Each structure stands twice: as structure tokens, then as C-alpha cells.
Image (spheres, helix red, strand yellow):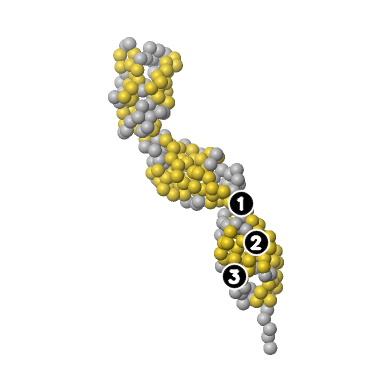
């Protein structure tokens, strides 16, 4: 007498299908010592029932006027606990793969990022990976994992849009570097790096539209400025000019 699924939440509420023979007059289904709810005689070979709350492994039995069946095991699974996200932000277009770690993840069937849902790849009870679906808009969304034991929330993932560079002030400075430059644009609050002519520059995020940057040493002439965040990069071609100092 197989049952599908053979596992469910400790809180109950799992719809289980039981198949067998001579089931038309089923009067009760029990999960261990507890009676199931919403028992439905679908056909002489099939009955559905909703599991009550429980823990561990219990035997499921079915009773008809002819007697009670042998028990078939049903496994109660606790709700998942998520400890961390491998990455907490990424591009609005999605497509990047992140790892979720925690406990009780072995039966995970879906991961939701706000209203968007993805199917995970389970590595173990403590780890799974999932390809992030596209987001509706830039900003934070709640992350939830659904398993046979239920759904658990509590983590946040932030969708990030590509940065854009609007202007630099000033637009020139010495080849020795050290010039304080203000970069304005959009989606700058998640900036990962800023480069001048390929050299990494130290920076501070002022807000979503402003960065404060100190130029690294460079070669005389025009240099490309690149701002990068988890979604992508924007390049201001030749936006900063390195000026050589006087020589005698």
C-alpha cells in the first residue's frame, strides 16, 4: 500500500494519496495514533488524506469494514532553517547562482525571491544552490525556502541595476594620483570597485548617486573611468586626464 508523498511537515497539513485495493469503504486513516483529516474515497484503489501534526516516523494505516491495513511509514520533517546566503545581492536580470546554507534543506522543492520562484539543486541537508530568477525591480526582496517540512523566511536578497556614470569633478589631476574626485550617476550605492585607466581607486559611497574617489597614480593622458557593482559596469571613456608635472 504505497503512499505519496511519504513525508511531510511536523505541523501537519500534507495531502497524502494512498493506493491499494478494496479501499472504497474506507472509514479512517491514521498516522500513528492520530486520525487524519479530510479523508476522501477517490476510488476503490485510491484514498486521499491530510496528515495531522506529528514527529519522527509513524505508521499510516487505513481502516475499512474488512479490517485495518498493515502500517506504511510516513516521515515527519521539521521546517528548514536558513543560516546564510552565499551572496546577498546580484543583477536585476538574475541568472547568477548562489548557495543557501542552513539545516533541513534536503527536501527543498523551491526557493522564492519575492514573487519569483526558482527550483534549487540540493547538495546536502545543510546546503543547496539556486539560480536567481529575474527581479521585478531593483531593491531588497524576502527569500524563502520551501521543503517537505514547510516554508521558512528570514533572509533578504537585493536586486541591483547596472551603474551609470554621469559626471566627474574635477576631470584632471597629476600623474602621481591623490586627486579627490566626485563621481555622480545612478545605482552607485552598491559599487564594488572604481578604476582609473585600469588601476583600482579607493572610494567611499556617499549615496545612490554619488561616490567620493581618490585617483591612483596613472600615465599622462586621458584615462577611462569604470564603476562596477554586482549587476555590471559602466565606462566613462577618457573621462579623467592625467597631467604630467613640470620637469627641468
First in sequence, mark 1 or 2: give its number.
1
- In this rendering, the label closer to the viewer, 3 or 2: 2
Q: Disc 1 versus disc 2: distance between alpha carbons?
A: 16 Å
Q: Residue at x 45, y 42 (%)?
A: 153
The quarter in which the C terminus is drawn is bottom right
Quarter residue 207 falls in: bottom right
154 left or right of 231?
left
Residue 168 seen from this side: yes
81 left or right of 228?
left
- The residue wearing badge 1 is 161
- The residue wearing badge 3 is 214
- The residue wearing badge 2 is 184
Query: Helix, strand or loop at disc 2?
Result: strand
Q: Residue at x 44, y 49 (%)?
A: 84
Quarter residue 191 falls in: bottom right
First in sequence, mark 1 or 3: give its number.
1
Q: Residue furthest left?
A: 33
Amino acid at each position: 500500500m504505497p503512499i505519496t508523498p511519504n513525508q511531510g511537515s511536523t505541523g501537519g497539513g500534507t495531502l497524502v494519496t494512498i493506493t491499494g485495493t478494496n479501499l472504497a469503504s474506507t472509514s479512517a486513516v491514521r498516522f500513528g495514533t492520530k486520525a487524519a483529516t479530510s479523508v476522501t474515497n477517490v476510488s476503490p484503489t485510491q484514498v486521499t488524506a491530510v496528515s495531522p501534526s506529528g514527529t519522527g516516523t509513524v505508521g499510516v494505516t487505513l481502516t475499512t469494514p474488512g479490517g485495518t491495513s498493515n502500517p506504511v511509514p510516513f516521515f515527519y520533517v521539521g521546517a528548514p532553517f536558513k543560516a546564510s546566503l552565499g551572496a546577498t545581492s546580484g543583477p536585476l536580470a538574475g541568472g547568477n547562482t548562489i548557495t543557501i546554507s542552513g539545516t533541513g534543506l534536503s527536501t527543498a522543492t523551491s526557493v522564492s525571491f519575492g514573487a519569483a520562484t526558482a527550483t534549487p539543486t540540493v547538495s546536502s541537508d545543510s546546503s543547496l544552490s539556486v539560480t536567481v530568477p529575474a527581479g521585478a525591480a531593483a531593491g531588497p526582496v524576502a527569500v524563502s525556502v520551501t521543503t517537505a517540512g514547510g516554508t521558512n523566511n528570514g533572509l533578504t536578497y537585493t536586486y541591483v541595476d547596472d551603474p551609470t556614470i554621469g559626471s566627474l569633478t574635477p576631470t584632471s589631476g597629476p600623474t602621481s594620483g591623490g586627486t579627490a574626485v566626485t563621481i555622480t550617476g545612478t545605482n552607485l550605492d552598491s559599487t564594488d570597485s572604481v578604476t582609473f585607466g585600469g588601476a583600482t581607486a579607493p572610494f567611499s559611497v556617499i549615496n545612490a548617486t554619488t561616490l567620493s574617489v581618490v585617483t591612483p597614480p596613472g600615465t599622462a593622458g586621458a584615462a577611462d573611468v569604470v564603476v562596477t557593482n554586482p549587476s555590471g559596469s559602466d565606462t566613462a571613456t577618457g573621462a579623467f586626464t592625467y597631467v604630467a608635472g613640470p620637469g627641468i
